[in-house]
Amino acid sequence: MEQEQKRLNGKQKKKLLKTFFLSAGVTLGLCIFILIAGVLVYDNTLGAGSTSQIKNALTEEEQAFEDEKKELGDLNKTVAILGVDEDEIRTDVIFVVNFNTMTNKVKVVSIPRDTKVIWTDKQKRAYNQLTGYTQNISKLNEMSAYGRINQNVGNIRDFTIDEIENILRVHIDNYVVVNLDAFKEIVDAIGGVDMYVPQDMYYVDNSQGLYINLKEGQQHLDAEDAEGLVRFRRYALGDEARVEVQQTFLKAVAEKVMSAEMRSNLPNIITRLFPYVKTDIKLTEVLGYLGILDEFSLSGLEFHIVPGYGDDSEGPSYYYINEEELDELIKDVFYDTTVAGEEVQEEAGVNEEEEIVTDKSVTIAIYNATGQRGLAGAFKNNLENLGYKVGKIDNYNEKDLEDSTIYAKDMSKAKQFLQYVEGADIKQDSSLEYDIEIIIGKESVK
């Protein structure tokens, strides 16, 4: 802890304090593109849920981190951004955004809406006082309906947000609840979005007036195309791939919103957006902080998904959280103490004293050698969420392979990808068209 406090002394602490004020501006800037995810609530098949056995119990290490945050002036903020359905009662899109001014990073965590919740005594009492009824088990997205947020949005703290805090073991400082009405208006307001569509998407549902017809490849998406992209759900890897595509889309919107041409118009866009949101953040606060958006870099923006799996063996389709993997996610997202740009990555088989070179300017090609459609596109989206640029994806033409291989012109720049391609070998080839060429084998996707 002493080392981290030294890191925050002097000019750097002043800079990070300034970044703290930026967080409120970024919150609504972020809302512009996260609002678009509200369209997902029309679809009732996202994931399935999680029974959280963790009820606000901080480890000794986490408590020490929380105490340090208070000593340093509360430089770490967490905001829940919730997209409600057509009736504005179920929170069918759930993002938690952490603004960590100690590290200059912004991390977004998606929680599947069908996460299974066993209600706590506190939640049961709140529900009984509100309605006179009792409730024991539900999906996470249903808690806001039980809490009658359409009558009083503040009730969301007693139910949905309380459970989010239980799951993630963090305090939610602010919330933003958004509805569906602004979806096409916002996409049109920013002039559409450029994004790589990872696979052909075709789906028709006349009952919903939904017609999706998108081709794989780099696309300029208008409001109607964007709606189709985020509502499409037929992926070889299921809902996890779907959430990854949604997150890639959100990052593409963020890039558009943060562009120089858009920043000058952000006050008008946010003022236009604000009637569609319910929040405990004041519009005047947000507009007052927009002038320092130039200090925020998208390279510090990361997306994560609460780990787990879907299962319908109990009848309803729930999403069950993998608690062991969740612990690692919580540490990485909410208790990170490494300032952006200072990361030293360690991988199995690499000398502990050896620093792995992280170079996000490398050119990358990805080849799918698994025989499963859409993997190269999904992997491309994952890397681009992390700040890399992928120039080419394709199927591996020779044959399907069991093992993955990372080919590189410079071996030192290949090691940074080992954490993303499980079990891959590294081979040097100075004749490559791209700096890095990744061949994904079956073993890496099991």
Image: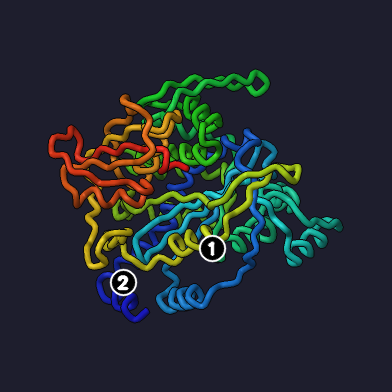
The answer to whether mark 2 and mark 1 are in CB contact below 8 A is no
- Residue 424 rendering spot, x and y as whole percentages: 33, 46
- Residue 36 rendering spot, x and y as whole percentages: 51, 38
Residue at screen point 58% across, 34% down = 181
Which residue type carries mark 2?
Answer: Lys
- Residue 268 rendering spot, x and y as whole percentages: 42, 41
Residue at screen point 64% across, 49% down = 49
The earlier-in-sequence mark between 2 and 1 is: 2
Q: Nearer the viewer, residue 101 or 357?
A: 357
Which residue type carries mark 1?
Answer: Asp
Is any atom of residue 91 visible in this view?
no
User: Which circle marks residue 154 in the picture?
Assistant: none
Disc 1 is placed on an element classified as: loop
Mark 2 to mark 1 CA distance (whole Å): 21 Å
Which residue is identified by label 1?
Answer: 173
Query: Left of 137 or right of it: where is 318?
Result: left
User: Which circle marks residue 13 in the picture?
Assistant: 2
Specify the farthest residue to the left: 430
Q: Label 1: few (<14), some or many (≥20) within 10 Å?
A: few
- In the picture, residue 357 is in which quadrant? bottom left
Is any atom of residue 211 visible in this view?
yes
Residue at screen point 44% across, 47% down = 30
Disc 2 is placed on an element classified as: helix
In the image, residue 55 above or below residue 131: below
Quadrant containing the N terminus is bottom left
